[in-house]
Image (cartoon, helix red, strand yellow):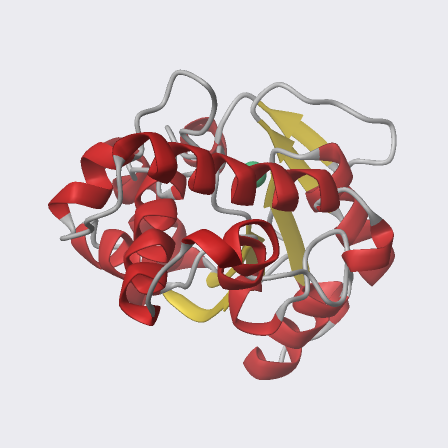
Amino acid sequence: MLNEFSVLLLDMNDTFMFSADRFGADQDYSIVYRRLGGTLQAKIVNKVIQSAYDYLDERYPDLIYQDSFPSVRDALLATSKEIIPTDQELDILIETFGHHELGHVPLSYSETLQRLAKRFRLGLIADIWAPQTLWIDELSRSGVLNLFEVTIFSSNCGIVKPSPRPFLQALEQMQAHVQDALVIGDSLRRDLGGAVAAGLPCLLVGGATHSSAYGALPNILTLVDNHS
Ligand SMILES: [Mg+2]
């Protein structure tokens, strides 16, 4: 099935990282925030983080922002500038947001990526809202960071999927051709949409199916079971 490809461009969340994006009314952001040394009242922290999340969540599907998506810093300042007293508190709020956005790479997925990396050149195309630092740490901890020749995080450049640009940028950096690459992701809109826009085939994982997709599998674990 995959013999025609030499490059896999992988999505991250719900493709090999899970339990990300812990936002909503049931979350107490002040717990992480306090651990990071923040001093604002819990009630204020929870309102500020949730407002920033809502600001970004509303804009994320809007094509107007596809090539200039706001950062968490932008969102915090747009929604709560007058109640964030110092730059230091702003930095702690950004890091708090990141901890709630960050997911976890299970061991079975780390092992699968290691097996895939023996057969394919791997690139990562990940939409994240907070700065990349926490993800670099988690990808490193789980032993997968070095498997990727290229890692493209949207928060570094403000370009989010389904823009074709991160996919094409990854191929350019890898000096690979469109016809050599397969996109793997769980999102119809972002991964399949971005792949189609870039002229790339997309294998869907996580349950989604679509007539425009190259194929669909329950997860990348079955990719290794079936094809290596
Ligand atoms: Mg995803």
Left or right of 89, for residue 68: right
* Nearest to the observer: residue 94 or residue 65: 94
Residue located 66% across and 75% down the image: 169
Q: Nearer the viewer, residue 17 or 82?
A: 82
- Residue 23 x/y as whole percent: 45, 29
The quarter holding residue 45 reads top left
Q: How many marks?
A: 0
Relative height, residue 65 to residue 157 (above, below) = above
In this view of the protein, can residue 228 be seen by the observer? Answer: no
Please identify the quarter of the rendering in which residue 167 is found.
Answer: bottom right
The percent coordinates of residue 205 (x first, y second) are 58, 29
Query: What residue is drawn where x is 76% and y is 65%?
Result: 179
Left or right: residue 188 versus residue 47 is: right
Vertical position of residue 224 compared to residue 125: above or below: above
In which quadrant of this rendering is ligand 1 seen? top right
Is residue 191 found left or right of 47 in the rendered image?
right
Q: Residue visible at 52% across and 51% down?
A: 80
Quadrant in the picture for the C terminus: top left
Quadrant that contains the N terminus: top right
Q: For this rendering, which residue is in front, 175 or 20?
A: 20
Q: Is residue 67 above or below residue 174?
A: above
Query: Residue 139, percent across and down?
Result: 28, 54
Q: Is residue 36 left or right of residue 180?
A: left
Report if residue 221 is visible in the image: yes
Q: Residue at the location (70% across, 53% down)? A: 161
